[in-house]
Image: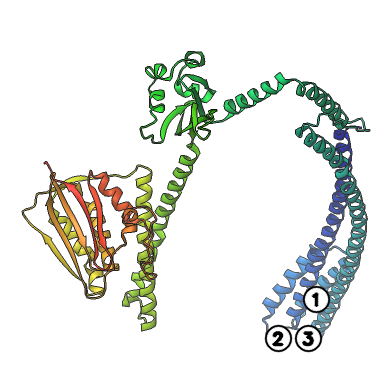
Amino acid sequence: MTIKNNLRAGIGFLFLLALVSSGLAAYYLYHLSKDARAILKDNYDSLVFSKNIDEALDLPNIPPTIQQQLIEKNIKDEEGNITEAGEKAFADSLYTNFIRFRQSSDNPLQKAIARANMKIATYGIMAVNMKAIKQRNKTANDDAANAIIIVLVIDTFCIVIALIFLIKFPGYIINPVKQLAEGIKEIANKNYDKRLKFTSKDEFWDLAQSFNEMAARLYDYENSSQAKIRFEQLRIEAIVKNVTDAIIGFDENSKIIFANPVAVKLLGAKKEEIIGRPATEVAADNDLLNKLIAEDEPFDDMKLYLDGSETYFSRELFEINAPDEGLFNKNRRNRIGYFILLKNITRFYQLDEAKTNFIATISHELKTPIGSLKMSLKLLEDERFGTTNEFQKELIKNIDDDSDRLLKITSELLDMGQVETGKLLLSFGSTHPQNIIKYTYETIRALAEQKEIDIKINCSKKLPEVWADLDKTTWVLINFLSNAIKYSSQKSTIELSVKKHKSRMIEFSVKDYGRGIEETYLHRVFERYFKVPDSGSNISGTGLGLAIAKDFIEAQAGQIGVESKINEGSRFYFLLPVSLV
């Protein structure tokens, strides 16, 4: 029997057992549910009706009309819920005596007799239903016990069969697979004398026959020297053809000797039109190849279209050298060719774009709850809604400060996402530098006053207007001042200056007298997520502010920079073009 049929038989048998077990369980569960419904509904309702009648008969100081209405309603409910033998007789007696009870309002003796008979009838109804409940409960328990025994027997049988299947079947599959794996290892080690022998006439037997035939042919092929050469050639060709990167090979005379299918697609030429031709000759009519063979020129990541989609590549050039066979210069190597590898880096661009979109989305979504949090804090601080003690005020202040920091981080991440996705929108206009300085100072003044820092402003009215985005430029200047305040000591001074620069540019600068930045880190301060080491453990930040500032200024055709010395402070500056309007 084949493996497929064995699997079908085994799994089918287990499925059948599981189906039988499930069916029996469903059957007994149905009966249990039926008994339970009878107990909980019919008999229980009769007990409730009888109890209500007894309570109505025993209630003191109840108006006769209300008493009779309660008794009559429950008698009618009971008559509509007759489920047990003998219960109807008690219900009829109850109704008959109730009529007498109602009609003998002027005869206390007859009323008492009727009331007693009604009590007897209700007790009878209760007794009948309680007996039925007990009997049905016994039946339900018996059914449950039988169901448990039967299901346990079937489940035990299923478990035994499954265990046998689990113990026997893996060996049935794994043992031949192990033999096949060992045979493949032997073939990989070039032991082509290896043969497999299986006794069962199944798929493994067919596989063993194919394996043995393959080994015999490999043995014949291996003994041919031509086969060895051909094998190496085919292996190299297979690697070159199947890589997703573009590969172009050249000999020592810069003739194209091979190009894989990806390279041929990118060059947009037929393979026979480029193989064997000098690279310079082909490059004369092919801009891409002309750029690729320029070894001395820098090569940035290139966006090309491959199979109708945008694909990014980076160039890598590898030389092929052979040792000099001379007697005196054995260490000298001669170039016998080279090849160009255009590495497909699309995946990294896609990952970077996904990262950027994720950060932008998260940052945008965070702004709404942060805004709600700020609004709630404002309401807590409003004494119209209640007063707070000093401890609560301190907590509110801490939450407000943390919310501001979180909002700043979120805004920075959102701005960075806009820059990276190319969605940065600039609104250019002509404005005087004093407008930028005024808005910046009003925004940052409260922060400076907290540390009693004096901001000295030097901005002449005679300066020409600048061509810039007012909001983005102000954001950059606020970032400079915020950093300067962070790293400045209490009661220190910060200089905010604007002056005309050469080449029709206006320079904005912020000078502080704090600790300063080591020269080692100056070239990295505008990198994303970079924070100067040992700048203070109590100073928080994402390391994005200066990177965003750089992108904002350069997007306005400006320049940005920093000057700093340890223990002398730092000066951050940027240049913007003069308005021509």
Q: Earlier in the sequence, mark 3 or mark 1?
A: 1
Q: Which mark is residue 568?
A: none
Q: Earlier in the sequence, mark 2 or mark 1?
A: 2
Q: Is residue 363 above or below residue 36?
A: above
* Circle 3: residue type: Pro
Please identify, in this view, whether the residue under mark 2 or under mark 1 is nearer the observer. 2
Q: Position of residue 375 (x, y in %)?
A: 35, 66
Q: Which mark is residue 60?
A: 2
The kind of secondary structure element at disc 2 is loop
Q: Nearer the viewer, residue 228 or 424?
A: 228
Q: Position of residue 172 (x, y in %)?
A: 88, 41
Q: CA distance from mark 3 to mark 1?
A: 11 Å
Numbered disc total: 3
Q: Which residue is mark 1?
A: 100
* Circle 2: residue type: Pro
Residue 42 lies left or right of residue 295; in this view the side is: right
Q: Position of residue 415 (x, y in %)?
A: 34, 51
Q: CA distance from mark 2 to mark 3?
A: 16 Å
Q: Which quadrant: the C terminus?
A: top left
Please identify, in this view, whether the residue under mark 2 or under mark 3 is nearer the observer. 2
Q: Nearer the viewer, residue 466 or 196?
A: 196
Q: Nearer the viewer, residue 560 or 153?
A: 560
Q: Position of residue 238 (x, y in %)?
A: 62, 26
Tell me the quarter of the picture where residue 267 sits: top left
